Image (spheres, rainbow, N blue to C red):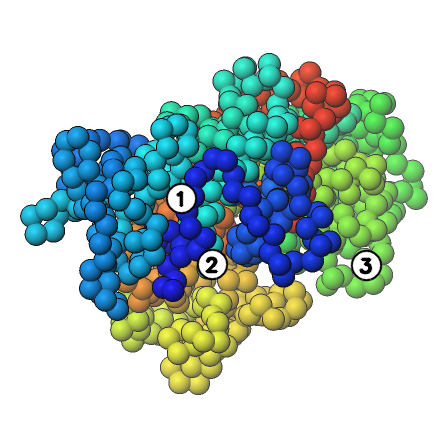
């Protein structure tokens, strides 16, 4: 028998197609044991968690085929959505058939004959109605001649073609026609095309799905109470599941998609809003904004704050004054000036007699932040007002220094000395004391710094996440700033809370994230955006070049290095099998150091190095001990080497736009003209479009939108670290549906914050399960 390919619309050789209703009762397979037979039940007796092989009469090959797709239970099958629909619902009389259109006709079989032999074998079936007749040709499907008989009524769906001047159907879908219109399954409707796999034949699979949908969908319990559904104009879940598989019309299909997509957004929004509530219902530390100190900071800055920075600062200040802890995301493209915004907020913590912590993903970034903070705040005078540990009694308007006894004063002097503060910076105890807490501190110093943090002598602590995971005890932690850490939030906040702190929290990211994703991933945070660059920035020249022009690129590198500049070369991760066309970072390093630039100093940074080793390489590069740094994508976001002016990205098409834009942000940080060179030999249309976008715009948000459109959310961040829950039905870009779902989520949580009401029991389970899955995937 000729095996039929999976995607073919034709019927499989066996079993023969039969009536849709009633469901076929299979004869028990003799090879099966009695025990297995016992477990079989009619669909009407099975529930959502039953396995497909428990369905009485189901073909074991079907069950095996579905299992290969990960579809094991009845629930899996209900959520095994079609990947597309073929609209063959336009049923016509034969004389009306349009050549080139997808059409459906119903007629009587007036002739069946096999022509040719071997691989040339065709079965010609003539179908006639009162207006005329048409031939359906089936290639290489010998069994058709046994299945279709003269005198039968059949429905035929497919594209109408012309051969020798005659219209015909070419291997169309077909089924025996039954007058009940609901019985039409494979033809005469919006035909669902389900994802299939080897051994899973289209019509058989669809027939089983139809049986399951008919029997089970009406019984699927809806996790949304009827009033809520009405509020959001949603189909019931059962109706939506039935219509998504076998839509009665395009409108019904749209309604089903809307309901199922809405659900996904709703689960996400309920999850993030619950987290937000959990965070905000805690009693926080309301700041009193010290305008004088803020004015002093601005006066001492070597530049004017941009309007965007000022807006972000006032949004943050408004939050800081509230009694519930701030949970805010500060989004700003590379170089948009987030650090000074964070510094302004941290300064207010100090002015309120509280401490601030600034956390970075790596030690070297922490060092950079500490240096920047010290510089920005070094001359700002902060008269401390609050003096007592008991927060209820804060804001006693006493001078902080007058309350120090001589012993404490001595300890303070020692701290300022460890921190390396000059009397000019100390300003009689009114300077801001910033400590960097990293592995580079000596044991004795580290002990003193930890003590200083615990006693409240140190105002601001900069470090990695070890700051809150380790045994660091804060005296009065008022504000935590987290830089460049996707997914931070949740877990770390819990840690802080467990340590008895409820500080305000500011999360900073340079990854431009489109609004729909912000609402999803960071839905529990309020958002401030720096959408303006500080003035006077030079554009980074971006060029896309083929690998044939590599020599030109090397000449450019040599010229830059000769002028005293430094260069990054970024290589994608490559599989062993791709090595022929694409060098790994290691190979690139070897080639550059030994063949191309034997006279220059080349360093290598790759993922197998430990965090400490990576930091060492980065430090050495920063201190200009190397001219060229070859690196994989592990190169740090946010690293600041102003003398680096060129970044070359090998196999540029391998990276996401957002990531390429991040790489580009590594240069153009000093006063020299900077360059970004994208090496790519890919002639893939989409890759070319993406790289062209990068040449044309330096706007990270615009690039992110383009990337999201071109590649979808899964790949958006280059990895799945983003924690984007997987959306099967909802369109990531469907902001309107997302906002509606968020609104309903808010309404539900207003009435029932914990989803504890009995009518929300199912919903709560669904939300929990959805988030458990998302966390695992992320
Ligand atoms: P990012 O948002 O990438 O963290 P930074 O805070 O590191 O950006 O700022 C990048 C550079 O821009 C720093 O050198 C900083 O001093 C400078 N800068 C920040 N704000 C302004 C401004 N308003 N005008 C001019 N330069 C600014
Ligand atoms: Mg930064």
Cα separation between marks 3 and 1? 68 Å
Against 635, residue 581 (above or below) is below
Quarter of the figure that contains the N terminus: bottom left
Q: Which residue is drawn at the image coordinates 63% and 53% (left, top)?
A: 361
According to the picture, the residue beneath numbered tag 1 turns out to be: 193
Any part of residue 485 in sight: no
According to the picture, the residue beneath numbered tag 3 turns out to be: 445
Cβ atoms at labels 1 and 2 below 8 Å apart: no
Q: Name the residue nearer the viewer: 85 or 463.
A: 85
Q: Nearer the viewer, mark 3 or mark 2?
A: 2
Q: Name the residue nearer the viewer: 443 or 65.
A: 65
How far across and how far down the image is residue 28, in percent?
A: 61, 52
Q: Name the residue nearer the viewer: 505 or 321.
A: 505
According to the picture, the residue beneath numbered tag 2 turns out to be: 199
Q: Is residue 426 left or right of residue 507?
A: right
Of the two numbered discs 3 and 1 on the same chain, state the one appearing first in sequence.
Answer: 1
Neighbourhood count class around disc 3 (C-alpha, 10 Å): few under 14, some 14–19, many 20 upward: some
Q: Is residue 655 left or right of residue 767?
A: left
Give the secondary structure at mark 2.
Answer: loop
How far across and how far down the image is residue 69, in percent?
A: 53, 53
Q: Nearer the viewer, mark 1 or mark 2?
A: 2
Give the secondary structure at mark 3.
Answer: helix
How far across and how far down the image is residue 166, in percent?
A: 10, 46
Confirm or reject: label 2 Cβ below 8 Å from ligand 2.
no
């Amino acid at each position: 028998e000729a095996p039929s390919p999976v995607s073919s619309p034709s019927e499989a050789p066996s079993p023969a197609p039969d009536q849709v209703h009633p469901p076929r009762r299979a004869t028990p397979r003799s090879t099966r044991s009695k025990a297995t037979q016992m477990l079989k039940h009619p669909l009407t007796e099975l529930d959502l968690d039953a396995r497909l092989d428990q369905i009485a009469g189901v073909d074991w090959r079907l069950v095996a085929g579905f299992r290969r797709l990960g579809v094991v239970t009845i629930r899996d099958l209900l959520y095994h959505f079609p990947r597309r629909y073929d609209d063959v619902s336009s049923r016509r009389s034969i004389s009306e058939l349009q050549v080139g259109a997808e059409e459906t006709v119903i007629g009587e079989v007036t002739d069946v004959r096999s022509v040719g032999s071997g691989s040339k074998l065709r079965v010609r079936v003539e179908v006639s109605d009162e207006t005329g007749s048409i031939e359906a040709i089936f290639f290489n499907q010998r069994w058709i001649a046994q299945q279709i008989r003269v005198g039968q009524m059949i429905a035929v769906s497919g594209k109408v073609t012309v051969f020798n001047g005659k219209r015909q159907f070419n291997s169309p879908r077909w089924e025996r026609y039954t007058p009940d219109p609901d019985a039409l399954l494979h033809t005469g409707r919006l035909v669902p095309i389900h994802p299939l796999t080897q051994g899973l034949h289209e019509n058989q699979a669809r027939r089983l799905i139809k049986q399951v949908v008919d029997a089970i969908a009406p019984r699927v319990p809806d996790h949304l109470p009827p009033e809520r559904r009405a509020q959001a104009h949603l189909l019931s879940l059962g109706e939506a599941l039935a219509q998504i598989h076998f839509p009665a019309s395009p409108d019904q299909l749209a309604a089903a998609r809307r309901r199922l997509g809405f659900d996904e957004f709703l689960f996400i929004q309920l999850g993030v809003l619950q987290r937000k509530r959990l965070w905000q219902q805690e009693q926080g530390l309301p700041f009193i904004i010290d305008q004088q100190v803020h004015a002093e900071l601005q006066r001492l800055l070597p530049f004017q704050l941009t309007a965007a920075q000022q807006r972000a600062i006032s949004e943050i200040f408004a939050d800081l004054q509230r009694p519930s802890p701030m949970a805010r995301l500060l989004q700003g493209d590379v170089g948009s000036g987030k650090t000074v915004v964070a510094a302004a907020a941290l300064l207010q913590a100090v002015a309120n007699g509280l401490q601030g912590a600034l956390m970075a993903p790596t030690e070297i970034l922490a060092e950079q932040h500490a240096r920047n903070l010290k510089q920005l705040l070094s001359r700002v005078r902060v008269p401390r007002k609050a003096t007592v540990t008991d927060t209820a009694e804060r804001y006693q308007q006493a001078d902080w220094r007058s309350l120090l006894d001589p012993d404490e004063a001595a300890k303070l002097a020692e701290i300022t000395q460890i921190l390396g503060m000059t009397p000019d910076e100390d300003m009689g105890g009114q300077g801001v004391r910033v400590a960097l807490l990293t592995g580079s501190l000596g044991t004795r110093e580290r002990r003193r710094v930890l003590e200083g943090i615990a006693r409240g002598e140190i105002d601001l602590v900069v470090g990695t996440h070890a700051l809150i995971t380790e045994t660091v005890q804060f005296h009065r932690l008022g504000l935590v700033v987290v830089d460049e850490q996707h997914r931070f939030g949740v877990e770390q906040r819990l840690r802080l809370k467990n340590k008895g702190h409820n500080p305000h929290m500011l999360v900073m990211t340079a990854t431009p994230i489109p609004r729909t994703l912000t609402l999803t991933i960071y839905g529990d945070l309020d958002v401030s955006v720096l959408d303006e660059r500080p003035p006077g920035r030079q554009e980074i020249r971006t060029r896309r070049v083929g690998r044939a022009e590599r020599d030109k690129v090397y000449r450019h590198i040599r010229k830059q290095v000769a002028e005293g500049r430094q260069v990054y070369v970024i290589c994608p991760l490559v599989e062993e099998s791709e090595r022929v066309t694409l060098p790994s970072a290691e190979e690139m390093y070897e080639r550059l150091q030994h063949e191309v630039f034997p006279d220059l100093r080349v360093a290598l940074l790759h993922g197998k190095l430990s965090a400490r080793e990576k930091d060492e390489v980065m430090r050495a590069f920063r201190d200009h001990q190397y001219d060229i740094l070859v690196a994989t994508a592990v190169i740090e976001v946010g690293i600041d080497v102003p003398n680096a002016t060129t970044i070359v990205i090998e196999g540029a098409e391998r990276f996401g736009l957002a990531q390429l834009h991040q790489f580009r942000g590594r240069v153009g940080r000093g006063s020299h003209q900077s360059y970004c060179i994208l090496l790519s030999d890919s002639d893939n249309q989409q890759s070319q479009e993406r790289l062209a976008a990068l040449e044309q715009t330096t706007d990270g948000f615009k690039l992110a939108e383009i990337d999201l459109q071109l590649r979808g959310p899964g790949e958006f961040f280059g990895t799945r670290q983003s924690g984007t829950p997987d959306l099967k039905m909802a369109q990531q870009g469907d902001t309107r549906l997302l906002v509606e779902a968020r609104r309903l989520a808010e309404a539900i949580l207003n009435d029932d914050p914990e989803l504890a009401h009995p009518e929300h029991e199912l919903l709560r389970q669904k939300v929990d399960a959805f988030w458990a899955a998302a966390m695992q995937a992320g």
